[in-house]
Each structure stands twice: as C-alpha cells, then as structure tokens.
C-alpha cells in the first residue's frame, strides 16, 4: 500500500506548494534563496512547513517565481497565535527531535503550569485582561509535545534564580517546581541547575533554546524583552551550542539538581524564602 505523504497542516500545504512552484520553475533551493536573499536552510524550513516566511520574504518569493502575489496573500491567512518574535519557534517545536533550553529568570514556556503562566502574563500586561485566558491556553498547549515519552529529547538547564523567584506566590511556585521534578524523575527531561555558587557562567546574559531536527540543520533562539532572534547561521549556532556546553559543565548533577528543585519547592510550600 502506498503511504499517504500529503501535507496535513495549512503550513505544510503552504510549504509543499512552494516546493512545487520552485521545482516547476526549474530552481534549486540555493537558487531561490539567492533571489529571496536568505539561506537555503530557510527555504528548506519553509518547504517542510516548519516555518513561515515573513511578509517581505513572501513578496520576494512571488517575484522570484512569478506567482503574482499568491504566497503573500496566502500568508495573511496563516497568522500565528503567538507574538511575532516567537511565532517561528512555536512552529518549529513540534518538529524538533531534541530541544535544549536554558533560562536565567523564569520557567520556560514548555514546562509552565497554567497558574504560573497566568502570573507571568499578568505581570507583563497588568492592564490588558481581554486576551489573558487565550494567551495562557496557547502557552500551556505548547507543552503537549512532551506527552510523547520519547520525542523530543528534552534538556532543561535552569539558573537557581528560576527556582527562587516567587512567581504567582508560594503555592504556584511549589506546584510548578514539583511538576518539573516529576518530569525529571520520570526521565521525560534531563534537568540541571546552575547554583548561585557557580558565579559567572557562559549563558548568564541570555535565555537560549537549541533545536535539532531529523532532516534540517539545527537552530538556536535567544530571547529578550519583546524581542527574539532565531539563528540559523552555522557559525552562530555552533557558538550557541558551545556556550550551552560550557554552562552545562558548571551545573549540578542530575541527582543534585533534582534534590535542589524538591528542596526549594518545599521551602515555598512552608512559606520560607
């Protein structure tokens, strides 16, 4: 029986149509990338449905392929549920075979409980309540990719400050930390903590996410206030991977990290600070 390999999601259909139009035009990914002014890797991500082009990129695709605004118009119907600077990462997460994250201030979105996520969004936008529930649902839904016990492989490196900062109050923090510890004990993620005693380390200036894929080059993503930068340049990705490895080498062992997370959760539960 022939396997059905048709694209399943709107983004995959967009990417498949892009591939078909490119091939019909007699272009390689490298040739199209030169006309669109991007990397061939980015063309690969678009065609696989892992990412969407930005409006300017879609307009250049239409000019390069002579498609009369087709891809630019279709793009308007594929708006993301997430902030513009993060939408690309949200699209890539379900396709990753391995995700390695570091956070220096808050629990990464993939692991956040509903109560923790609500407290984070409430702090970001205290006067904007209309879409709070929707934002919480969208964030916690991302974590469903971890329901699969094997894929993606997940590494979580946390600064001790993430454990100590009382986001949402002691009960919210205790629930959040126990969730992380439970996942680590179940071997669903590899957990390491960078204790305060380590001092300076290679990632102290930024949050970092590294992703690997079966059929595409790895990427790195760094994030700040209302900004995010996805890196697919091989040299920058390699530098990010090296920085992660350096920071990981300073971290506590898995057993020590798990014990610390449990201990701090107990401190929150008993009102200690």
Image (cartoon, rainbow, N blue to C red):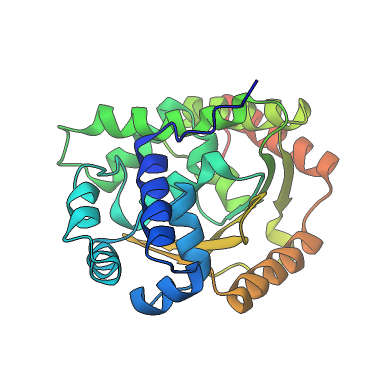
Q: Residue at point 22% right, 60% down?
A: 67
Relative horizontal placement of residue 22, taking residue 173 as reference (left or right): left
Q: Residue at point 45% right, 36% down?
A: 7
Relative horizontal placement of residue 77, taking residue 259 as reference (left or right): left
Residue in front for this viewpoint, 223 or 91: 91
Q: Residue at point 65% right, 36% down?
A: 264
Image coordinates for residue 154, horizontal then vertical, percent: 68, 42
Tally of numbered discs: 0
Task: Inspect this view and state whether residue 28 appears.
Answer: yes
Image coordinates for residue 38, horizontal then vertical, percent: 41, 74
Residue in front for this viewpoint, 134 or 71: 71
Locate the C terminus and report the quarter of the image it occupies. top right
**On screen, 37 above or below 114?**
below
Residue located farthest toward the top when viewing the structure as drawn: 1
Q: Residue at point 25% right, 44% down?
A: 79
Task: Inspect this view and state whether residue 107 appears.
Answer: no
**On screen, 203 above or below 47?**
below
Please tell me in which quadrant of the rendered image residue 184 appears.
Answer: top right
Image coordinates for residue 125, horizontal then vertical, percent: 23, 45
Image coordinates for residue 271, horizontal then vertical, percent: 54, 29
Residue in front for this viewpoint, 37 or 141: 37
Locate the N terminus and report the quarter of the image it occupies. top right
Residue in front for this viewpoint, 171 or 193: 193
């Amino acid at each position: 029986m022939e396997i059905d390999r048709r694209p399943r999601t709107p983004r995959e259909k967009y990417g498949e149509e892009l591939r078909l139009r490119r091939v019909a035009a007699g272009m390689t990914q490298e040739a199209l990338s030169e006309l669109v002014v991007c990397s061939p890797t980015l063309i690969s991500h678009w065609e696989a449905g892992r990412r969407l082009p930005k409006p300017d990129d879609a307009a250049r695709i239409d000019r390069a392929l002579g498609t009369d605004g087709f891809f630019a118009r279709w793009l308007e119907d594929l708006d993301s549920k997430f902030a513009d600077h993060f939408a690309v990462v949200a699209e890539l997460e379900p396709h990753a075979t391995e995700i390695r994250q570091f956070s220096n201030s808050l629990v990464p979105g993939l692991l956040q409980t509903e109560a923790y996520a609500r407290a984070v969004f409430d702090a970001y936008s205290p006067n904007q309540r209309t879409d709070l529930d929707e934002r919480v649902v969208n964030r916690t839904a991302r974590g469903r990719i971890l329901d699969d016990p094997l894929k993606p492989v997940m590494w979580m490196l946390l600064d001790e400050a993430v454990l100590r900062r009382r986001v949402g109050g002691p009960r919210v923090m205790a629930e959040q930390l126990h969730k992380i510890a439970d996942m680590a004990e179940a071997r669903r993620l590899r957990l390491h903590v960078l204790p305060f005693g380590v001092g300076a380390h290679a990632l102290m200036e930024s949050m970092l996410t590294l992703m690997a894929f079966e059929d595409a080059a790895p990427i790195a993503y760094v994030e700040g206030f209302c900004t995010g930068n996805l890196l697919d340049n091989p040299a920058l990705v390699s530098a990010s991977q090296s920085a992660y490895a350096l920071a990981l080498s300073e971290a506590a062992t898995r057993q020590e990290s798990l014990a610390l997370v449990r201990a701090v959760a107990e401190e929150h539960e008993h009102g200690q600070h």
